Amino acid sequence: MYEEGKIRAIALGIIRDGDRIFVSEGYDPSKSSYFYRALGGGIDFGETSFAALQREFQEEIQAELKNIRYLGCLENIFTYNGKPGHEIIQLYMCDFVDPKFYQSERFEFWEGERKKTAVWVDINRCKSGELRLVPESVLQYL
């Protein structure tokens, strides 16, 4: 998780299916608002971002990835639950190996002690600002 005053390196994977993308739903209690983010997570010491992306999808939703393509590096400075955060994001575009992930609208999973939800959302709802995709700079890749 986040350590105050530290920069966190993470790998995120954009999975697109037509006009929709697969994202994790989050809630910021200090802002009373929902947000959406591509799935992925922290890069461990000695691990490549490519390997971290594969591991995170396996740990979180037991999914294998294919067609993994590097998109670029993003920097995200933000506030969550009233506390500052700073991430360096290695961003990838990828696909699911198992077609079942394209057929269900919602997936429940655990991230440590927290129960989370991954959903398919319409890209246009993110581009219009109706749904908040974070970091916002991800929109340029959709």
Image (cartoon, rainbow, N blue to C red):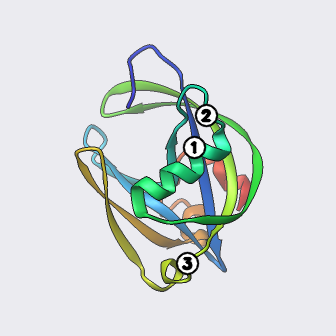
Disc 3/disc 2 C-alpha distance (Å)? 25 Å
Q: Amino acid at mark 3?
A: Asp
Q: List the residue tagged with mark 2.
A: 47
Label 2 environment density (alpha carbons within 10 Å; few <14, some 14–19, many ≥20): few
Give the image location of residue 134, x and y in percent: 53, 47
> Label for residue 96?
none
In the image, residue 141 above or below residue 29: below
Label 1 environment density (alpha carbons within 10 Å; few <14, some 14–19, many ≥20): many
Can residue 132 be seen at all in this image of the molecule?
no
Give the image location of residue 75, x and y in percent: 64, 32
Residue lying at 58% horizontally and 53% vertically, measured from the top left: 54
Q: Earlier in the sequence, mark 1 or mark 3?
A: 1
Q: Amino acid at mark 1?
A: Ala
> Label for residue 52?
1
The residue lying toward the viewer, choosing from 124 and 21, is 21
Q: Earlier in the sequence, mark 3 or mark 2?
A: 2
Disc 1/disc 3 C-alpha distance (Å)? 19 Å
In the image, residue 100 above or below residue 69: below
Residue lying at 61% horizontally and 27% vertically, measured from the top left: 46
| Element type where label 3 sits in the image | loop
State yes or no: discs 1 and 2 in contact (Cβ < 8 Å): yes
Q: How many marks?
A: 3
Compared across the picture, whether 28 is left or right of 86 comes to left
Q: List the residue tagged with mark 3.
A: 98
Quadrant containing the N terminus is top left
| Element type where label 1 sits in the image | helix
In the image, residue 116 above or below residue 119: above
| Element type where label 2 sits in the image | loop
Residue lying at 22% horizontally and 45% vertically, measured from the top left: 113
Compared across the picture, whether 67 is left or right of 135 comes to right
